[in-house]
Structures are given as structure tokens and as C-alpha cells.
Amino acid sequence: MLSHVYRFLKHNNIIHLKLFIILLMSCIPDGIDLSSNRLLATSPIPSYFNSSTILPSLKTLRLDGYFSFENNQHAANDFGSTHHFLPTAVLHPKSVADISSTVKHIFEMGSGSELTVAARGHGHSLQGQAQAHRGVVINMESLLEQEIQVCSGEHPYVDVSGGELWINILHETLRYGLAPKSWTDYLYLTVGGTLSNAGISGQAFKHGPQISNVYQLEVVTGKGEVVTCSENQNADLFYAVLGGLGQFGIITRARISLEPAPKMVKWVRVLYSDFPSFSKDQEHLISSQDSFDYIEGFVIINRTGLLNTWRSSFDPKDPIRAGQFSSEGRTLYCLEMAIHFSPNDKDIMNQVSISNK
Ligand SMILES: Cc1cc2nc3c(=O)[nH]c(=O)nc-3n(C[C@H](O)[C@H](O)[C@H](O)COP(=O)(O)OP(=O)(O)OC[C@H]3O[C@@H](n4cnc5c(N)ncnc54)[C@H](O)[C@@H]3O)c2cc1C
């Protein structure tokens, strides 16, 4: 039954709901912290499970990787740098079995231990999302058990570790003339980290966010079981983990859909000084069939000297107009667009991108 509900919700834009929740959570003031990765600072660890019993208990686990119990400050920081929760231990797994046996061990301690677990990708989230107060942080980037495996064919895909960086996936898939369909702007983020959020960039209007481009996941559940899930297999878990903010399981492997990588790209940026024209054009472009392959809108606040940082974006034949531009601290709006094309169409590309607009 649940799987039908999930499928129904997915088809009715659950992704938008998740994005809304993520936006809502990012607006929650500092005083309220919904992160269930951590214990409230006031919750004492019961005496029968304090650090003097937890540490020896974790040390009994036979692992391919290892725990670090000291010098774990890096695991108490993230991109926001406003929340710092020191874990009791950091697991550096070398296998999925390491993660599974650690989570199982903690699950079997029972709820009395109150020991929390957080997967940490590249630590580029905010507000302690990837931290575990007095708990165990799992450093997913050390899980390199499985190499990146590309499968070309009619429906190409790539199998990757949950701790893999998207930049590495791009380099590897390009060797086969392929690339993932949906991206984030910044690629030094892990697969598990962005699939736990959504993964949005200028391809989302066409292919959906990254979580809509996954064929299959391998997940370590809260009981420490290793479960394969997809749209047709353990679908409840699949749709809970995708966009689940790390609360429904740990992604140890993902099968990601690929497409032929573009051979050439025409890249255009258009600046607006008024919001209604900007949003009207963006809505028009994203709703037009066969327009661009990438469309993203930005708000640019209080950035003088903007074009100095964009100099490489402009046609070298147009330095005079570019030099005359001054944002002078105004709020500006920018549409960034790209269209893929074959080298054979090189000569007509400027006309095509203008007529699309
Ligand atoms: C400079 C910058 C640019 C960005 N650009 C974009 C963008 O263009 N589009 C976009 O959508 N987002 C963007 N983000 C946001 C980013 O996608 C998220 O913050 C993402 O979670 C960071 O990935 P990470 O590997 O650093 O994850 P972390 O910060 O390590 O973890 C984030 C969350 O995912 C969970 N998690 C991590 N790994 C796993 C796993 N294997 N299994 C289950 N849960 C896991 C963690 O517990 C935590 O809750 C950007 C962030 C930065 C700092």
C-alpha cells in the first residue's frame, strides 16, 4: 500500500513538496534545531551507556576500516560553520559491512543508549545536518570499496559508492562519452549528500532533480540491514531515502541514469534589472519544448565589479559594452542558459540560441 502512495505522491510532484520542506527547514531560526542526528545538549547519556562503556563496545567490532576516537573536530564542522557537535567516534569504513555492523551494533544497544549516527559526505551542508552530537559520524568518503562502473547501452547508467564525489563521476563517465542527466552547480559534493537533499541545477526543469534520475540504491537501514531498493523493489525505502535528509538509511551505492554527453555547448547569460521581466522570461523558457538544455536563474545582490569576474563569459569582440556595465550595488537578475549541439551545427548555433529566446 505504502509503495502505491509513494508512487502516487511522486507522480504528483512530491519533489516539489520535498524542496519546499528543505527550504522551510533552512529558514528555521537557530534556536530551534530539528536535526534528529543529534541529541539535545541537555539530554544526559544514561550512566549505563556513557563514553567509558561505548568506546570499549565500539572497539570490539571487527572492521575492514577503523574508528577514530580523538582529533575528530573536522566532523564537528560543516559548510555553514555555525553548528559544532563533537562526535564520540568517527567511522572510516572500508566496506559496506563496516557500516552495517556498526549501525547494527548501535541498534542492538537499544534506545537506552541514545547514541546517534550521521553519515557525512563532503560536509557541505549547514546547521549540523551531517553531525552527531556525542554519536558516531560515518565518513562516507573513505568507502571506496567499489570503483565507478559505467554501463553503456540503450539505457546507460553508472554504479557508484555513496561517498563518491560527482566530479569524479563526471570524469569517469566522459571517458565513455556519457554523463549524468541532472547536476548540482558545484561538483565537489558526494552522491549520498546530494541524493539526501534533492540535487538541483539548470537541468532540473528538463530531467527533474538528481533524485529523479536514480535507478537503484543500496541502503544500510537503521537496523544495520543492507537492502537494495528501487521503484520496483522495496519502493518505500527507495522514496524515503531519496530526499530523506539522511534520516531513513545510509546510501552505500547508487545506480544513476546517464545520457550521451554533449560534444559542444553554447552558453549564454542575460542580465535583468527588473524581476517581472526576468521571471516571465524564465517561466517562458522552462515551459517551452525544445528550448535550452540548461536554464538557471540567479539573484545577484550587491555585487559591484560583476563583469570582472565574468570577463571570460563575454565575446572578446564586445569589450566596450561589457566595460560600460556597472551594477553599482543594485540587485540584478541573471538567466544562465546553455544549449547542446553537434560540431556540425557550429555555424548556425548563434541563430538557434537567439530564436529559442
Ligand atoms: C558551494 C556549494 C554549492 C552548492 N550547490 C548546490 C547546487 O547547485 N544544487 C544543490 O542542489 N545543492 C547545492 N549545494 C547544497 C548541497 O547539495 C548539499 O548541502 C549536500 O547535502 C552537500 O553534499 P555533501 O556530500 O557535502 O553532504 P553532507 O553535508 O556531508 O551531508 C548532507 C546530508 O546528507 C546526509 N548524507 C550524507 N551522505 C549520506 C549517505 N551516503 N547516505 C545517507 N545520507 C547521507 C548527511 O547525514 C546530511 O544529513 C551546494 C552547497 C555548497 C556548499
Image (spheres, grey):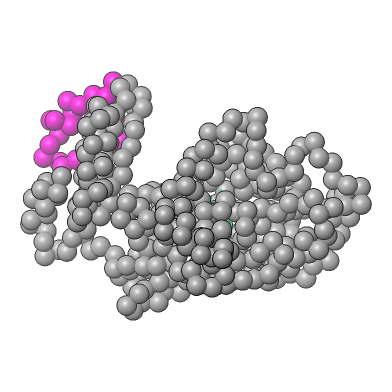
Residue 55: x %, y % from top left = 84, 56
> Is 308 displayed left or right of 84 in the figure?
left
| Frontmost residue, 139 versus 153 | 153
Residue 183: x %, y % from top left = 39, 55
Residue at image location 11% in from the left, 40% down from the top = 317
Determine whether 98 is above or below 293 in the image. below
Residue 157: x %, y % from top left = 40, 71
Residue at image location 88% in from the left, 47% down from the top = 46
The residue furthest front is 1
Tell me if residue 48 can be seen: yes
Residue 269: x %, y % from top left = 23, 41
Q: Does the stretch in magenta take in 179?
A: no
Determine whether 280 is above or below 185 in the image. above
Q: Does the stretch in magenta take in 321?
A: yes
Residue at image location 36% in from the left, 67% down from the top = 258
Quarter of the image that includes the C terminus: top left
Question: Which span of residues is magenta-colored?
Answer: 306-328
Q: Main secondary structure of the magenta part?
A: helix
